[in-house]
Image (tube, coloured by chain):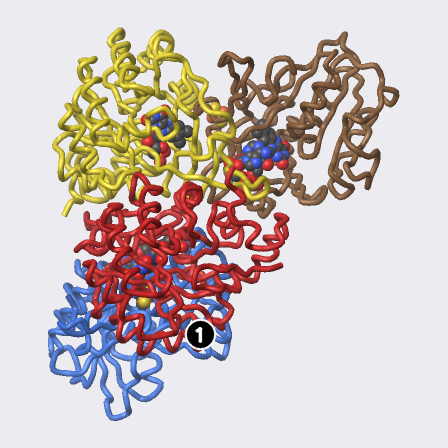
Chain colours: A blue, B brown, C red, D yellow
Amino acid sequence: MQQLLKIKSKQTVALDTVEMVLENKAVSQIAVPGQFLHLHVDGHMLRRPISIADADPSVHTVTILFKILGEGTRKLSTYQIGDVIDVLGPNGNGFPLVNATKNSVLIVGGGIGVPPLYYLAKKLTESGVTITAVLGFQSKEHVFYEGEFEELGKTIVVTNDGSYGETGFVTNISKEALPSIDEYYSCGPLPMLQAVKERWNNIPGYLSLEERMGCGIGACFACVIPTDDHGGYKKICQDGPVFSAEEVQLK
Amino acid sequence: MQQLLKIKSKQTVALDTVEMVLENKAVSQIAVPGQFLHLHVDGHMLRRPISIADADPSVHTVTILFKILGEGTRKLSTYQIGDVIDVLGPNGNGFPLVNATKNSVLIVGGGIGVPPLYYLAKKLTESGVTITAVLGFQSKEHVFYEGEFEELGKTIVVTNDGSYGETGFVTNISKEALPSIDEYYSCGPLPMLQAVKERWNNIPGYLSLEERMGCGIGACFACVIPTDDHGGYKKICQDGPVFSAEEVQLK
Amino acid sequence: MSLAVELPGLSLKNPIMPASGCFGFGREYSDFYDLSILGAVIMKAATMESRFGNPTPRVAETSAGMLNAIGLQNPGVKKIIATEVPFLASFSIPIIANIAGSTIEEYRQVAKAFQHTDQVAALELNISCPNVKEGGIQFGTDPFMAQKVTEAVKEATNLPVYVKLSPNVADIVGMAKAVEKAGADGLSMINTLTGMQIHLATRKPVIANKTGGLSGPAIKPIAIRMIYEVKQHVSIPIIGMGGIMHAEDVLEFLLAGASAVAVGTANFQNPYVCKEIIEQLPHTLMQYSFSSVKEAIGKGIV
Amino acid sequence: MSLAVELPGLSLKNPIMPASGCFGFGREYSDFYDLSILGAVIMKAATMESRFGNPTPRVAETSAGMLNAIGLQNPGVKKIIATEVPFLASFSIPIIANIAGSTIEEYRQVAKAFQHTDQVAALELNISCPNVKEGGIQFGTDPFMAQKVTEAVKEATNLPVYVKLSPNVADIVGMAKAVEKAGADGLSMINTLTGMQIHLATRKPVIANKTGGLSGPAIKPIAIRMIYEVKQHVSIPIIGMGGIMHAEDVLEFLLAGASAVAVGTANFQNPYVCKEIIEQLPHTLMQYSFSSVKEAIGKGIV
Ligand SMILES: Cc1cc2nc3c(=O)[nH]c(=O)nc-3n(C[C@H](O)[C@H](O)[C@H](O)COP(=O)(O)OP(=O)(O)OC[C@H]3O[C@@H](n4cnc5c(N)ncnc54)[C@H](O)[C@@H]3O)c2cc1C
Ligand SMILES: Cc1cc2nc3c(=O)[nH]c(=O)nc-3n(C[C@H](O)[C@H](O)[C@H](O)COP(=O)(O)OP(=O)(O)OC[C@H]3O[C@@H](n4cnc5c(N)ncnc54)[C@H](O)[C@@H]3O)c2cc1C
Ligand SMILES: Cc1cc2nc3c(=O)[nH]c(=O)nc-3n(C[C@H](O)[C@H](O)[C@H](O)COP(=O)(O)O)c2cc1C
Ligand SMILES: Cc1cc2nc3c(=O)[nH]c(=O)nc-3n(C[C@H](O)[C@H](O)[C@H](O)COP(=O)(O)O)c2cc1C
Ligand code: FES
Ligand code: FES
């Protein structure tokens, strides 16, 4: 569906990283963790897919966080409170919320892959699941939402250069530092997802994937990902962006 | 020169016709009647040439009036007070201000050709010249600046459909309705200028011409007008937009 | 205000249809509006067997345009006939099947396969997809090859055939004449221009296939020029496309000589674009003193 | 950070030059900044005799681009040498003369005329101007004709010759190879794509010449693609152009295989654009981990 979302607040939460709280009743009511909004940015041909980082139907808000990378996100960052953003969404399928027996869940986020995991973590803890979050960032000035995650569960921040928290990659965290886990959920850059899938290959996991998109709704075949070697595929925008780790081939 | 002009006020003075008072000290000090500003409009490749309709160096203002015709002027009309417009200018040469002996001047304006003539009329009357203005518009709802001109001299408004003032074209005004005149100045659509040149071919006249422009400063040869049949030409943006009626061929 | 246009095999209640590859098989857009308002629909390219297409990334954004190299991903003509055609047929609008192949034989087979349904009204012969490596490109830029494939398809079908021309040629009129001579019932123009974008950080082309097809408003002046030129040299009708975003653009294509238009890239930015254009078109025609779509066709040719 | 590039006949302190026809003979832009900062300057096209060019309107705006049909208006080669070249020479930057003609003989004569000054460093052979009717177009789209005119000009001059290619062709590599074989010292690419815009209210083409050349960011993906393809098949250097607005665009052209670039349409929007790009370029190169312009040339080719 196409909706207009009004910017209610806007703040820079880390280097080049902007958080916007948007107002729209319908979207706030139906958004589930892992879904994304396909945002139109003035003067740009293609829309930008941005994950839903939080939603509060009681006050009709939806939160997004985005990193200023190219021209579209740079332009978006100049939008002011009160401005209205034209979006398609919520698009795609969210994370499957675990059933109650799986009660220890690992959340692994990398950089701008962290936002959708926040909404997920909130929903999981609300339903009684224990979460442990490992959040990786390039360096200290990129870190955001550490406090927000700490309110939900054990949170370990890792920076590649060691300027904050642990040093290295999210997959470097030793077994001892983590509780025993039943399932994991991850979102971040592809090399990280590959490493995550490999490290925790003995337990069920869900990955949220990114790809350059055209339509964002399943019509153009821009965002496919192979599911096997025989031409099988899924569309990230429509069938994903969340997939079970087994379901997709990470090239 | 390139300058930033801040919008100080903005009002609709007739159907689809917007007046903007812009602030810029340098431009207000050097602008002469007949010159134009080459305005950059967000998202548009080419600048838009718009005449200077007034300038007041004492308060650092420059006034423009424009008609909403296509996408560029439509966009410009959405600019708000406080917004800043990037302009090149003042460009071109203005009207040659008559010497004191020529003391009765006819001003003939058509539609959106009227604005530059206002600044001209002001300057002429300031230097003691008597002006008579004939202003043509499509119909009543297009009329603007009648009062402003009346403060400067005799003003006759003509509408094509007769819905206001006299009926017909500016060149229909009878000899009797006009004083004896020494010189004329005109700006408006090409067919009007041709008719004006023909009707007052016995006295010196100056015409302000329009053409689609690229650079607006004389470099691209987009806006040439033939001066003879042997390849002679002038550039409207650099040598004009004002020419003596004899100097140019109106095709 | 009559928006209707009659073309070989196509009775269009209005001249607006989604362009091939930019609307899938209509399912997703049917969530946004009732597809029965469309003049027609052009399906995504069909090949004989299912194809996966090119590796990703498959799209990039450019100034006033985009690049794509989907690579003809599709489930194969049999599946399209079995599942997609019936879905679209439920909207009671003319269905145009875009057909592609790597060899003349494949084109012929795909065309033949569409004989097995009576729900397809016409074929659009995609000889111009720049993203197929095995031959697509040469069909679209060589008049002799274009003629050959058109003849083969005409033989294999009794449906009207609209040949979709590639703009990546020096002489578009020569291409148009060649396929007209070969029996084409109409032309579709233009397909995308071959382009590329290089990603500065990774120092390589953004599109995995390296090059992609440029579409969107950026190419509209090229489409208008080619239609204007071709219209004066052929007597078969033209379905125009390339950068249409608004009803005004549609009128510009009609004036240049198109009898109907297809809207591609714009659907990605605004899923309602075809609906909005259909609603706006009567007003736009009236504003410029036309009393029907038919009246405007070719009126810009001087 | 070294911005310097050495090309046949041209020692460029930086790779930025204004494109032919978009900077006149520099006089107007010299009011905005000191032209001596430029890597070089390419003059507006010179023909043997003075030309008035096409009727007006000569330009139109398009999405992320513009159309122009100036029609080679210029004061003739003699006057250019007498008055314009000395003016530009006062800035001590390499001057490239863009030469055009309606016949091979005219090209030869214009080239010869530039032997009469020692202030011109190289010739840019404009075989691709789409706005000249008598023959310009066929030189630019026919490899045989392109070869002929290149050979004629090479014979007539001892200056290095950069042949400016037209993008209005199916096989740009074939064109490039043909002129390389004919002795071209370098290539300039791309010139404009032929386009048209129709004015709805008057129902006729906006440009009096009907068609015009499309330039600006709209065509950048086509320029990048063509340079990328050609670079891999020729060994002469390429001056790249087509839609450059920012230093990032310059780097994209370098990565695609250009050794230097020309900036055209952007000058109209921002008269300081060449200056700003020259100032920004070192930062952009650094940001993407290059330590010189030379290092970036062709690095995007995979
Ligand atoms: C399902 C999904 C969810 C996402 N969620 C977030 C999020 O919550 N926060 C966030 O900051 N980013 C998110 N991204 C990435 C985000 O879409 C890109 O960073 C953004 O589109 C870049 O746009 P730009 O204008 O800055 O870059 P440009 O380089 O100007 O973009 C050019 C084109 O490439 C596309 N593009 C460039 N990088 C990416 C990318 N990494 N993924 C997909 N398309 C890309 C753009 O959408 C655009 O079409 C998500 C991506 C996907 C697919
Ligand atoms: C010296 C000069 C002074 C002018 N002064 C005024 C003025 O004071 N007030 C006013 O309303 N108009 C004036 N005009 C006309 C004004 O420039 C056009 O109306 C305006 O450029 C149209 O832009 P658009 O975006 O609305 O139209 P679009 O059709 O979107 O414009 C497309 C392109 O065509 C050009 N164009 C379209 N119509 C004209 C035209 N009539 N003349 C020149 N270029 C055109 C635009 O500049 C642009 O490059 C003047 C023109 C010139 C040459
Ligand atoms: C993502 C995408 C996929 C396309 N797929 C096809 C296709 O399968 N067959 C075809 O003939 N044209 C295809 N095209 C070309 C369009 O149908 C159309 O000719 C072109 O995009 C120009 O129109 P536009 O500017 O409105 O998009 C595709 C275009 C895009 C953008
Ligand atoms: C108004 C205008 C005039 C031009 N005149 C010439 C010319 O005389 N000779 C030539 O070789 N190219 C000419 N060109 C083409 C440019 O030099 C350049 O190749 C083209 O515009 C692409 O670059 P751009 O997108 O940066 O403008 C002209 C372009 C424009 C816009
Ligand atoms: S973006 Fe179009 S199918 Fe996913
Ligand atoms: S607009 Fe370029 S010379 Fe006048």
Q: Nearest the camera: D214 or D14?
A: D214
Q: Report the residue marked by disc 1.
A: C31
Q: How many marks?
A: 1
Residue D265, visible in the rendered structure: yes
Q: Secondary structure at mark 1?
A: helix
Tell me residue B39's x, y (percent): 53, 35
Q: Is residue A211 left or right of residue C64?
A: left
Q: Is residue D166 above or below residue A94?
A: above
Q: Residue furthest right?
A: B176
Ligand 2 position by quadrant? top right
Please rate how many residues cluster around mark 1, counting C-alpha atoms within 10 Å: few if below 14, some from 14 to 19, many from 20. Answer: few
Tell me residue A241's x, y (percent): 29, 72
Q: Quadrant of residue D147?
A: top left
Residue D276, visible in the rendered structure: no
Q: Nearest the camera: D206 or A81?
A: D206
Q: Tell me which residue sits at (47%, 47%) in the image.
A: C257
Q: Nearest the camera: C217 or A34?
A: C217
Q: Is residue D30 left or right of residue B100?
A: left
